[in-house]
Image (tube, helix red, strand yellow):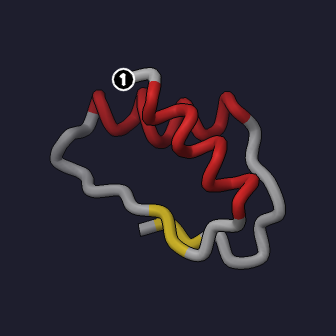
Amino acid sequence: MDTFDGVESIGQAFADEIFRVFQNEHPEVSISAQNTNPDVDFMIKRALAQK
């Protein structure tokens, strides 16, 4: 679990690496994002859409 409390933004490359690349390489690891603001949430959803 990652908490993004206080994080204003993340880059596209960071979101892609964690939520798409890493997750695809390590399916046994469960990743969920909590306390995201709309900007962070957008980047995470964008990365997940690339699966």
* In front of the other: 28 or 48: 48
Q: Residue at x 69, y 32 (%)?
A: 12
Image position of 11 (left or right of 51): right
Q: Is residue 8 above or below residue 13?
A: below
Q: Position of residue 40 (x, y in %)?
A: 69, 54
* Label 1 crowd bin: few (<14), some (14–19), many (20+), radius 10 Å: few
* In front of the other: 7 or 22: 7
**Residue 41 placement: quadrant:** bottom right
For the residue labelled by badge 1, is the local secondary structure a helix, a strand or a loop? loop
The quadrant of the image that shows the C terminus is top left
Q: Position of residue 20 (x, y in %)?
A: 42, 32
Residue matched to label 1: 51
Give the residue at the far right of this rendering.
Answer: 8
Give the residue at the far top of this rendering.
Answer: 50
Q: Residue at x 67, y 29 (%)?
A: 13
Q: Residue at x 77, y 66 (%)?
A: 7
Give the residue at the far left of this rendering.
Answer: 28
Q: Residue at x 75, y 38 (%)?
A: 11
The quadrant of the image that shows the N terminus is bottom left
User: How many numbered dots are placed on residues in this image?
Assistant: 1
Identify which amino acid the numbered label 1 is placed on. Answer: Lys
Image position of 28 (left or right of 33): left
Q: Position of residue 45 (x, y in %)?
A: 52, 42
Q: Position of residue 30 (x, y in %)?
A: 27, 56
